[in-house]
Image (cartoon, rainbow, N blue to C red):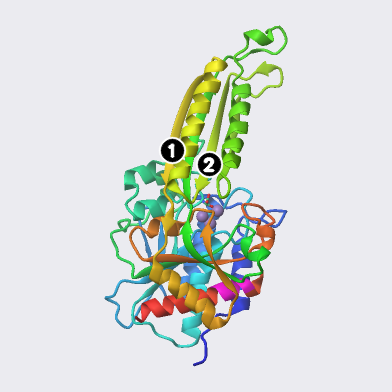
């Protein structure tokens, strides 16, 4: 039987066109959640989906669902999707590939006049990155019942603007309730954002699990004073405390190899003046590991070290774990659909655990879910140099189409 395939050039062109919205000089994309640029990207996606004959629904967290009717439209949909928001120095593919591959599946089924029994939907999940509004994956988290709607809408950026205010401002505060709507299955196509598939020359990653994450916000408060006359023995230097803890975070990561990841990505120094001893430092910690117990051990080690360092330096400390997303095993049947689809196309593939968090992690709590990975150049992501090959992106989209068809017609 002739294999149904997608249009590689059209998928690539749609990625490049979307990538122009918030495109940066270095060839990346800066399209933070709920900015005017995010609105432009959303509007383009909605226009394309309407042109493909989809009906559109938007929920109160701004999640978008573009629906292609099934012959039995009473059935729960098979949903594909990811996110359109990016990191400040993001790329053209992280998230966007999963959204536009859903659209490409719909366009390809239209081209070939193929109907599905269950409806299928291409979806966009608001604020997956958690860069502007922490935590990450908050809108898929509300959909999955991990967070309530009030919590989701109240998430604020560093200027105090909330998601609720920004959703209303850009016209994406939809009428639909968030969640409570069954999916037959959910599939997210995504670049790996790491080096394994490229190192092993594999075209498809069959994602079996996603690692757990713990996010922290730590504020150390000492005393601003003059960098000249203040004796070294009389200082309460918040930045020295932060420096020791930043090094400790890295050591905790190294002490829990293989697999542990430990990152301090955001540091704010106050007053941030070259001849004033820093009185206050705010910084974030991102811990990850596939094993929940190891992640708990890392948490314990950080808390003990933070207490010790702040005590030794006479610093006040506000230590808050703002988010915990446990390790996620994906649905075996959905994982098998992805693996069998890769095999049916003869694509080289391997099972893989996702190092990054994804909306699929939360959706897996309310629907059978799995992911399709494709390699990215040098394993680089969350970087303007992020790149992927058109043929790999099309291969992943062919696998997605096959897995979706199987579930929509079973
Ligand atoms: O941080 C993550 O894993 C995702 O990219 N939001
Ligand atoms: Mn992503
Ligand atoms: Mn990301
Ligand atoms: Mn993600």
Q: Looking at mark 2, is its residue's CB closer than 8 Å to ligand 1?
A: yes
Residue sitting at x 37%, y 78%: 408
The CA distance from mark 1 to mark 2 is 10 Å
Q: Secondary structure at mark 1?
A: strand
Q: Nearer the viewer, residue 21 or 352?
A: 352
Residue 378 place in picture, x, y as percent: 69, 59
The quarter of the picture where residue 115 lies is bottom left
Neighbor class of circle 1 (other Cα within 10 Å; few <14, some 14-19, many 20+) is some
User: In the picture shown, does residue 5 fall above or below 129?
Assistant: below
Residue 106 or residue 300, whichever sits in front:
300
Residue 245 figure quarter: top right
* Mark closer to the chain start, 1 or 2: 2
Query: What are the residue bounds of the magenta stretch?
Result: 392-396
Residue 302 in view, yes or no: yes
* Quadrant location of the C terminus in the rendered image: bottom left
Relative to 232, is 220 above or below?
Answer: below
Looking at the rendered structure, which numbered label has been put on residue 322?
Answer: 1
Q: Is residue 16 left or right of residue 151?
A: right
Secondary element at tag 2: strand
Q: Which mark is residue 286?
A: 2
Q: How would you rate the neighbour count of disc 2 (Cα within 10 Å): few for under 14, some for 14-19, many for 20 or more? A: some
Task: Tell me: 10 left or right of 184.
Answer: right
């Amino acid at each position: 039987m002739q294999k149904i395939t997608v249009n590689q050039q059209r998928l690539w062109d749609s990625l490049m066109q979307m990538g122009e919205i918030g495109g940066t000089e270095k060839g990346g994309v800066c399209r933070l959640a709920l900015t005017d640029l995010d609105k432009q990207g959303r509007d383009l996606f909605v226009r394309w989906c309407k042109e493909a004959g989809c009906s559109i629904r938007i929920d109160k967290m701004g999640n978008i669902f573009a629906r292609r009717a099934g012959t039995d439209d009473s059935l729960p949909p098979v949903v594909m999707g990811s996110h359109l928001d990016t990191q400040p120095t993001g790329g053209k593919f992280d998230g966007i590939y999963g959204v536009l591959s859903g659209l490409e599946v719909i366009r390809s089924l239209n081209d070939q006049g193929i109907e599905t029994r269950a409806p299928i939907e291409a979806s966009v999940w608001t604020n997956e990155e958690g860069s502007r509004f922490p935590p990450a994956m908050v809108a898929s988290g509300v959909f999955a019942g991990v967070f309530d709607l009030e919590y989701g809408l109240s998430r604020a950026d560093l200027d105090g603007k909330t998601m609720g205010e920004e959703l209303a401002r850009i016209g994406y505060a939809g009428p639909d309730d968030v969640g409570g709507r069954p999916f037959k299955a959910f599939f997210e196509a995504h670049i790996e954002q790491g080096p394994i598939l490229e190192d092993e020359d594999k075209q498809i990653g069959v994602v079996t699990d996603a690692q757990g994450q713990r996010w922290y916000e730590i504020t150390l408060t000492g005393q601003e004073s003059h960098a000249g006359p203040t004796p070294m023995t009389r200082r309460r230097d918040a930045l020295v405390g932060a420096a020791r803890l930043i090094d400790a975070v890295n050591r905790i990561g190294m002490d829990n190899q293989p697999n542990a990841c430990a990152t301090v990505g955001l540091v704010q120094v106050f007053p941030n003046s070259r001849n004033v001893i820093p009185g206050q430092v705010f910084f974030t910690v991102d811990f990850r590991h596939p094993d929940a117990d190891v992640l708990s051990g890392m948490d314990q080690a950080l808390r003990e070290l933070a207490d010790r360092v702040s005590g030794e330096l006479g610093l006040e400390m506000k230590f808050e774990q703002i988010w915990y997303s446990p390790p996620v095993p994906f649905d075996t049947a959905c994982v098998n659909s992805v693996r069998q689809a890769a095999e049916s196309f003869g694509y080289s593939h391997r099972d893989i655990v996702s190092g990054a968090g994804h909306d699929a992690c939360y959706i897996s709590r309310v629907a059978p879910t799995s992911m399709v990975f494709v390699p990215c150049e040098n394993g680089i992501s969350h970087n303007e140099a992020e790149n992927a090959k058109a043929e790999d992106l099309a291969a992943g989209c062919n696998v997605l189409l096959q897995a979706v068809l199987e579930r929509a017609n079973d």
